[in-house]
Amino acid sequence: MRTPISYFLILSGVLFAIGTVGVLVRRNALLIFMSVELQLNAVNLALVAFSRLHGNLTGQVLAFFSMVVAAAEVVVGLAIIVAVYRRGRTVNVDAARELAG
Amino acid sequence: MPLDNVVFWVFAPISVASAIGMLTRRNAVHAALFLVVNFFCLSVMYLILDAPFLFAVQIVVYAGAIMVLFLFVIMLLGVDRGDDLKERLLGQRPLAIVLGVGVAVELFLAARAGIGLSTRVAPGFAEQVNRDGNTQALAEVLFRDYFLPFEITSILLIVAAIAAMVLAQRKAKAITQAEAKAGTPP
């Protein structure tokens, strides 16, 4: 493989930054959640790139665990979003003010 | 130009563009479809990083299961309601973009300082580490060195499944009661 490994890390960093901006800018809870998924995937890419760099499989195992945990997180997170929607008829995070003091 | 370089330069711009597309679409379905494109590009990256098992898992789990779940919830909550793009906090959006650019620059500098921009990996990963195939090698590491975390992961999945069922069920009861009180048939 002739591509420098840092290219993958830079791509991962750019995707992570885009995900960060998404979390901060979007107001729809579903879109915030999708941005979090983008961040998780960016970190997975960095893990696999480091696994390739160091020549062992620990990074890939960690990325695998990260995917499993992300799947569990999506299930619970979407259930919570649906529950919040049924309570207030909205998924806008500005409108969900029940916990505001 | 070697093949993996070509593949990288084809798919890296697509993945960044689709991520930006996800960021800027008002419609949640369009954003989800952009995210699917992005996940496919990342799976191709796994392929050229000699991780074919994660390539398959990425497509099956992310582009398949998770995004279907997302689209299902988007449909359930109503497709037509787009994101409210009105700014509530003064100057939050420009500040967020500045912060995002700062994070990207910082990670770029960290990668440059950490491993250097032109470090190429040693050849032979496929022959040595992935000797009997990536899936076998990964399974060996997973079930020998990381067996306890693997088992804990299964507990986590069961807890998540039960949690989703409990959350959905209780709220289903609550909505029927609320609707019965309001007297509006669904």
Image (tube, coloured by chain):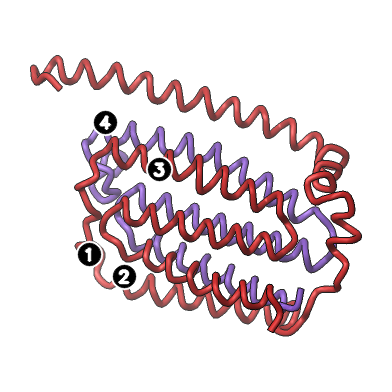
The three-letter amino acid code for the residue at tag 2 is: Arg
Q: Which mark is residue B87?
A: 1
Chain identifier, colour red = B
Disc 2 to disc 3, C-alpha distance: 25 Å
Spatial CA distance of label 3 from label 4 is 17 Å
Tell me the subunit letter for badge 2. B
Tags 2 and 1 touching, CB below 8 Å: yes
In the rendered structure, the colour chosen for chain A is purple
Q: Earlier in the sequence, mark 2 or mark 3?
A: 3
Tell me the residue that label 4 is attached to: A86
Is residue B117 depicted above or below B169 in this figure? below
The image quarter containing residue A101 is: top left
Q: Residue at x 74, y 65 (%)?
A: A50
Give the x, y percent position of residue B91: 28, 72
Look at label 1 and name its amino acid: Glu
Q: Chain of mark 1?
A: B
Q: CA distance from mark 1 to mark 3?
A: 25 Å
Give the Cα separation between the discs numbered 4 and 2.
Answer: 29 Å
Identify whether B165 is placed above or below A96.
Answer: above
> Label 3's element?
helix
Instruction: For marks 1 and 3, give the one nearer the viewer.
Output: 3
